């Protein structure tokens, strides 16, 4: 439990590396998905200590703070400095202040930050993966092909390499593998070949040019309302942000800093990340992880989680009608067991 002094006088306060306007809407226009379901599984309570690894517009954090009032606290992370501007605005609201500690960082480091800030052991960890609406709506971030902008796609514009580097520098074969692996793009080779041809004429620097190259290479599918470049953009975003790798680290870190009875809630938006979450929860909740066919258990595995969701939870028709982003949201949750596991 974080010491009361830390929460009254946080040693780490909201900080961010970028300018940008303070927004008047604390959620930044981002409607949190599966909010009631998230709160149901996290079960925030007064005095509880929670970590929101994906602060975004702060909708989930705000709800957790409300539900854990008057003294529950949230340690919030986001890789994007703009999210920290929104966190600052939320901190300034009555009744929030030191109950919200926000640090701009990649959530792959969440176990370290939870320990360093005194928040661990935690009562709940939330990861609401993917993008915030404010990121999608800004042409300068390069996430969306409906705008023309620089081909960047990084959550933290100061970390790693922009998507343009991948597009302009990877050998054709590696580019095709990337599009196939992270975009599940069946026409990956054809798209990679077109990109390589085009970049020889001039480096590909913008979203609009890349989208045009992809649609010229593969055309639109008749009757499909999905842009032909959708999978290519997804693949590049995943690669630019190392999304699958950092998710694996964050899940392992979360289990290590949850208190017994603490909850883990993860909302995924595509099958690649959901598969990682599903397998992780299966593995961590299994009593035995021996290869199938062994006559006796030799693994000595101790489950650290109990799954709270058998099947993945999806948004209700009412929510998908009002928030299209929620259509692809898949929530899974689990509860931390004591270190000795489930009584056998
Ligand atoms: C779907 S939004 C979260 C929305 C938020 N729950 C809300 O209610 O407003 C996902 C956020 O996670 C951030 N993000 C994605 N991957 C991250 C990572 N590895 N580390 C830290 N933040 C990350 C993105 O910058 C984005 O703001």
Image: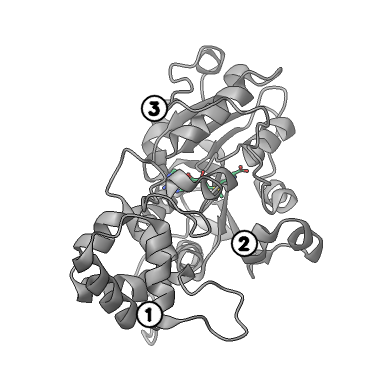
Residue 209 percent location from the top left of the image: 38, 62
Circle 2 is placed at which residue position? Answer: 329
Judged from the image, the secondary structure of the residue bearing numbered disc 1 is helix
For residue 217, the mark is: 1
Element at label 2: loop
For the residue carrying disc 3, how many other residues have a C-alpha within 10 Å: few (<14), some (14-19), or many (20+)?
Answer: some
Q: Does the rendering let one see residue 151? A: yes
Q: Residue 302: horizontal and vertical position, in percent?
A: 43, 60
Q: Which residue sits at x=34%, y=69%?
A: 299
Task: Name the N-terminal-most of marks 2 and 3.
Answer: 3
Q: Residue furthest front?
A: 201
In the depicted structure, whether residue 94 falls above or below residue 122: above
Dot 3 corresponds to which residue?
A: 17
Give coordinates of residue 2: x percent, y percent: 51, 24
Question: Which of the 4 quarters of the picture holds residue 125?
Answer: top right
Work out which quarter of the rendered image holds the C terminus and state it.
Answer: bottom right
Where residue 29 appears, x then y in whole percent? Answer: 66, 41
- Nearer the observer, disc 3 or disc 1? 1
**Among numbered discs 3 and 1, the one appearing first in the sequence:** 3
Q: Nearer the viewer, mark 2 or mark 3?
A: 3
Q: Nearer the viewer, mark 2 or mark 1?
A: 1
The crowd level at tag 1 (other Cα within 10 Å; few <14, some 14-19, many 20+) is some
Q: Residues within 10 Å of mark 2 (few under 14, many from 20)?
A: many
**Measured Cα–Cα span from mark 2 to mark 1:** 30 Å
User: Do we see residue 298 in this rendering?
Assistant: no
* Left or right placement of residue 217 versus residue 195 in this view: right
Does residue 322 appear left or right of residue 49 in this picture? right
Q: Residue at x 64, y 70 (%)?
A: 311
The quadrant holding residue 116 is top left
- Badge 2 vs badge 1, beta-carbon distance below 8 Å: no
Rounded to the nearest angstrom, the CA distance separating label 3 from label 1 is 39 Å
């Amino acid at each position: 439990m974080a010491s009361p002094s830390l929460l009254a006088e946080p040693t780490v306060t909201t900080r961010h590396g970028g300018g940008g306007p303070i927004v008047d809407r604390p959620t930044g226009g981002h409607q949190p998905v599966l909010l009631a379901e998230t709160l149901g599984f996290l079960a925030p309570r007064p005095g509880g200590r929670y970590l929101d690894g994906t602060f975004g517009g702060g909708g989930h954090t705000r709800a957790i703070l409300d539900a854990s009032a008057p003294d529950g606290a949230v340690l919030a992370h986001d890789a994007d400095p703009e999210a920290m501007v929104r966190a600052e605005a939320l901190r300034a609201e009555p009744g929030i202040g030191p109950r919200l500690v926000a640090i701009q960082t990649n959530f792959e480091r969440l176990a370290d930050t939870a320990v360093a800030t005194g928040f661990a052991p935690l009562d709940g960890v939330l990861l609401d993966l993917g993008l915030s609406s404010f990121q999608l709506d800004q042409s300068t971030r390069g996430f969306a092909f409906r705008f023309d902008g620089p081909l960047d796609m990084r959550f933290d514009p100061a970390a790693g390499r922009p998507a343009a580097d991948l597009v302009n520098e990877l050998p054709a074969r590696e580019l095709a593998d990337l599009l196939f692996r992270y975009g599940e793009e069946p026409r990956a080779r054809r798209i990679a070949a077109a990109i390589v041809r085009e970049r020889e004429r001039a480096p590909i620097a913008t979203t609009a040019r890349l989208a045009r190259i992809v649609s010229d290479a593969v055309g639109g599918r008749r009757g499909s309302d999905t842009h032909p470049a959708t999978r290519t953009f997804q693949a590049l975003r995943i690669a630019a942000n190392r999304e699958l790798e950092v998710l694996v680290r964050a899940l392992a870190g979360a289990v290590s800093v949850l208190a017994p009875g603490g909850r883990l809630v993860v909302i995924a938006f595509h099958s690649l990340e959901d598969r990682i979450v599903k397998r992780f929860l299966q593995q961590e909740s299994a009593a035995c992880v021996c290869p199938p066919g062994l006559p006796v258990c030799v693994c000595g595995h101790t489950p650290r989680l109990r799954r709270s969701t058998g099947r993945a939870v999806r948004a209700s028709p009412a929510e998908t009608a009002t928030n299209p982003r929620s259509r692809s949201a898949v929530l899974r949750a689990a509860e931390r067991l004591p270190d000795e596991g489930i009584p056998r």
